[in-house]
Image (cartoon, rainbow, N blue to C red):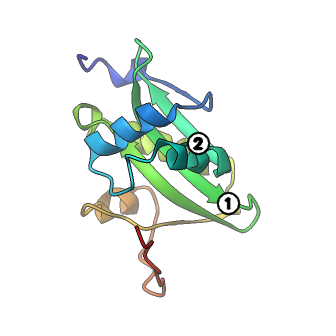
Amino acid sequence: MAVSDVAAVRLGRDGARAAEVAELFRSAGLNAPLDDLARIERMLEEAQDVVVARAEDGTLVGLVRVLTDFSFNAFIADLAVLPGWQGRGLGSQLVTAVVADHPRVKFLVHPGHDSGPFWNKLGFEPAPTCLVRPRSE
């Protein structure tokens, strides 16, 4: 698939299939149990907000997934953009789409892949008080 103008990408909450999310995550280098499609489907169903980015041909090129109470706290669980679409503002558009409607909610993220500067540009600040219990598989 040829990368086209990011302005032609359509953002929406129209859902994504587990298989295409697994492929997106795999291509973007996200660490998750990507061979368990039933688990990915449940991940998508249980999230409070999922915004997808689709190219003109309908290909899933980006996704952001949020777990939240929509009142006090929200956790950006995943942000993935296909490598050919990275560095063009699509990730920023996805994050902006989920945070813009909730200015009184504190958003948290566990940045990976040396992405701290990306999150800093979007107004996220370091919070050294976070603790993590890793998943077992």
* Residue 98 place in picture, x, y as percent: 59, 46
Q: Residues within 10 Å of mark 2 (few under 14, many from 20)?
A: many
- Say the numbered circle drawn on residue 50: 2
Which image quadrant is residue 103 in?
bottom right
Sequence-first disc among 2 and 1: 2
The kind of secondary structure element at disc 2 is: strand
In the picture, the quarter occupied by the C terminus is: bottom left
Residue drawn at x 43%, y 49% is: 79
- Above or below 98: residue 118: below
What amino acid type should be assigned to the residue bearing mark 1? Thr
Horizontal side of residue 26 vs 119, given as left or right = left
Determine which residue is flagged by label 1. 68
What amino acid type should be assigned to the residue bearing mark 2? Val
- Above or below 21: residue 113: below
* Residue 32 place in picture, x, y as percent: 38, 56
Looking at this view, is 16 or 94 the one in front? Answer: 16
Residue drawn at x 32%, y 19% is: 5
Looking at this view, is 83 or 92 the one in front? Answer: 83
